[in-house]
Image (cartoon, rainbow, N blue to C red):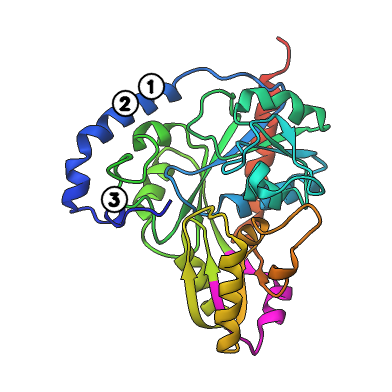
């Protein structure tokens, strides 16, 4: 889906008219968040958002997984598998699964670490633990109460913030902000901007850490695009940020195309993009997440092999602070489970 434009306009009459529905939705969501979840028996770190749409959860999960491995932990990702047809629980296997089976983000992450997909997150705990996990990284699911979370790290875009600050359908929030703030253990602000300043101040006033991070392009991706004029396309939560990142990295974006988030590209669509690019001598470039939706069990199909993936990693301004946060949360999680 594409986010309605009025979600980012506080004075929108459409948003105002939807406030009664938003109040009902928000009341149900807030009450649901109060339920007690199942204890996984090992630490569970949730990476979530206050709102629908993208803000950088997947790069955050990958950055945390890298840190956890440096700490001699064995992280396993637990995901709902949004956009996939398999209800699970199932371990993602890139040699047999496609994005249509398990979702684009799980398929992408499975290239570097174990990923379990389960629509019922509580049902996925046993399979995640069976992968020799010492820590479970929940990709999304902050508002889902089925699993007890030892720490909830919330990712927010520094520019977009939470839009108009209203609950679905009047705005992008998945639940009223107050109960979400109460359950936030740390806020990760991605990239610059003033959109997240008020939220960050509120979280900080509760004694919770604020971490700043930036999406940095992979050098191999930049090397493949140097001197090229490109046609960029994306079907993610915030395509504009992807195009801006390309331009800020020195990539000559001549044209761009946007698609709905998690869009299932067809062969005809890609062939048309390839033809459009060829007509103006443009190189096609897209995100790793978009490319995952084109990948089959045998790899990338021939009709998509000319597309260049633009890989990014999340880099924290204060890596030591992130390390302290994670080690502290792991200690507290394990201490809580010690027999008394």
Return the residue found at the far top.
Answer: 340
Residue labelled with disc 2: 27
- Is residue 282 visible in this depiction of the protein? no
Q: Which residues are magenta?
A: 215-232
Secondary structure category for the residue under label 1: helix
Residue labelled with disc 1: 31
Residue 222 among magenta residues: yes
Residue labelled with disc 3: 164
User: In the picture, which quadrant includes the C terminus?
Assistant: top right
Residue 89 lies, in percent from the top left, at: 70, 29
Q: Residue at x 81, y 56 (%)?
A: 298
Compared with 98, 238 (above or below) is: below
198 left or right, relative to 220: left
Q: Nearer the viewer, residue 253 or 187?
A: 253
Q: Callout 3 environment at 10 Å: few (<14), some (14 to 19), or many (20+)?
A: some
- Is residue 40 visible in this depiction of the protein? yes
Compared with 333, 169 (above or below) is: below
Q: Are marks 1 and 2 in contact (CB under 8 Å)?
A: yes
Residue 16 lies, in percent from the top left, at: 18, 44
* Image disc number at residue 256: none
Q: Callout 2 environment at 10 Å: few (<14), some (14 to 19), or many (20+)?
A: some
Residue 161 lies, in percent from the top left, at: 39, 54
Compared with 177, 231 (above or below) is: below
Q: Residue at x 74, y 23 (%)?
A: 126
Secondary structure category for the residue under label 3: loop
Marked residue nearer the N-terminal end (3 or 1): 1
């Amino acid at each position: 889906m594409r986010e309605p434009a009025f979600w980012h306009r506080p004075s929108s009459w459409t948003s105002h008219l939807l406030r009664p529905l938003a109040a009902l939705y928000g009341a149900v969501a807030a009450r649901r968040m109060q339920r007690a979840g199942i204890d996984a028996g090992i630490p569970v770190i949730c990476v979530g958002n206050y709102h629908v749409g993208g803000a950088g959860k997947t790069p955050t999960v990958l950055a945390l997984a890298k840190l956890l491995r440096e700490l001699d932990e064995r992280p396993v990702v637990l995901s709902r598998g949004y956009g996939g047809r398999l209800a699970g629980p199932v371990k993602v296997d890139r040699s047999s699964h496609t994005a249509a089976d398990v979702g684009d983000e799980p398929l992408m992450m499975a290239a570097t670490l174990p990923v379990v997909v389960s629509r019922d997150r509580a049902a996925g705990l046993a399979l995640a633990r069976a992968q020799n996990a010492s820590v479970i990284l929940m990709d999304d699911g902050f508002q889902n109460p089925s699993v007890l979370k030892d720490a909830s790290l919330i990712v927010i875009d520094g520019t977009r913030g939470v839009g108009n600050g209203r609950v679905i359908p009047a705005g992008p929030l998945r639940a009223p902000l107050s109960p979400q703030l109460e359950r936030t253990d740390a806020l990760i602000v991605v990239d610059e901007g003033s959109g997240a300043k008020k939220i960050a101040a509120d979280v900080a006033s509760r004694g919770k850490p604020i971490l700043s991070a930036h999406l940095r392009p992979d050098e191999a991706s930049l090397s493949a695009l140097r001197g090229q004029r490109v046609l960029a396309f994306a079907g993610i939560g915030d395509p504009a940020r992807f195009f801006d990142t390309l331009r800020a990295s020195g990539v000559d974006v001549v044209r761009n195309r946007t698609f709905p988030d998690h869009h299932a590209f067809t062969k005809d669509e890609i062939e048309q993009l390839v033809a459009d690019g060829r007509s103006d001598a443009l190189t096609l470039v897209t995100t790793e997440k978009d490319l995952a939706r084109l990948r089959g069990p045998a790899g990338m199909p021939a009709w998509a092999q000319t597309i260049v993936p633009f890989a990014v990693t999340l880099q924290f301004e204060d890596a030591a602070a992130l390390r302290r946060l994670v080690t502290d949360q792991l200690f507290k999680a394990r201490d809580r489970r010690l027999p008394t």
